[in-house]
Image: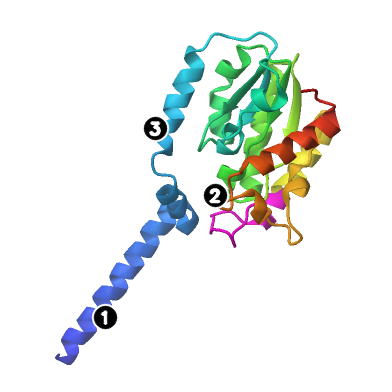
Amino acid sequence: MKPYLLYASILLNLLLLAAFGYALHRYGGWRNLWSKISSRGIEKTYFHRKNLFEMLPPKEGAIVFLGNSITAGNEWAEMFGNPNILNRGIPGDHCDGIRARLDEVLKNRPSKIFLMAGVNDLAFYPPSIVLPKYERLVEAILTKSPHTTLYLQSVLPVNNLVSPTPVDNDDVRLLNDGIRQLAKAKGLIFIDLYQALQDLDGNLDAAYTQDGVHLNGAAYLKWAEVLKVELKMEN
């Protein structure tokens, strides 16, 4: 190959890499890209589940578990033997998404809400951006439903050794510190589930997950145990 063709080829490849890097940056980086690839189909599930909730009749005074796929993955009413419990977890949801669908949740005039949110936000943003989103969600619940007792549950650890995720546990801990402080400032109960489900290294215990993020039955039983002990919830 002639030297000028070689140089032109190298230059073209560098320009293509630069263009790819710029596009990736504009798209939100590797973590954002990873999340989009790994969550294909979640958007349709989200809207199907949201539509279902909107069609269901209200249940006055319900106890609501509110959050994303981690909340959605359990049968809370069966676990506590309480038909007054509603599961309002939707896979892929985040702080702004939950805030946008609060009207459906609050039409039940819930006596209690157990909120868990933030891990999906951390896949895209640092804790310094996620915490204000979380605060706006909490403020919206308190303003629109002042009669509801709101419990702030910590974000759970992940395990990137079991399977890579776009979330880092240092970020989870920072966000949880902010949530804990928010609970104290608002006079709310903070429930530390991170500590209950972590291993000795601070990761989500591998015995509780197949993909490093979502939970199996043993984990949900542990979660329920924590709630029963801390809040004296009855079966």
Task: Tell me: 208 left or right of 51.
Answer: right
Where is residue 159 drawn, in percent x and y? Answer: 62, 56
* Residue of label 1: 10
**Where's the C terminus, which quadrant?**
top right
Q: Is residue 214 above or below residue 136?
A: below
* Residue of label 3: 44
> What residue range appears in magenta?
158-174
Q: Is residue 165 magenta?
A: yes
Taking the image as drawn, is residue 185 in sight? no
* Residue of label 2: 123
**Mark 1 packing: few (<14 Cα in 10 Å), some, or many (20+)?**
few
In three-dimensional space, the C-alpha distance between marks 2 and 1, rounded to whole angstroms, equals: 34 Å
**Where's the N terminus, which quadrant?**
bottom left
| Residue lying at 67% horizontally and 50% vertically, measured from the top left | 157
The colouring scheme, among rainbow, by chain, secondary structure or one colour, is rainbow
Taking the image as drawn, is residue 207 in sight? yes
The secondary structure type at the circle numbered 3 is: helix
In three-dimensional space, the C-alpha distance between marks 2 and 3, rounded to whole angstroms, equals: 19 Å
Name the residue nearer the viewer: 232 or 131. Answer: 232
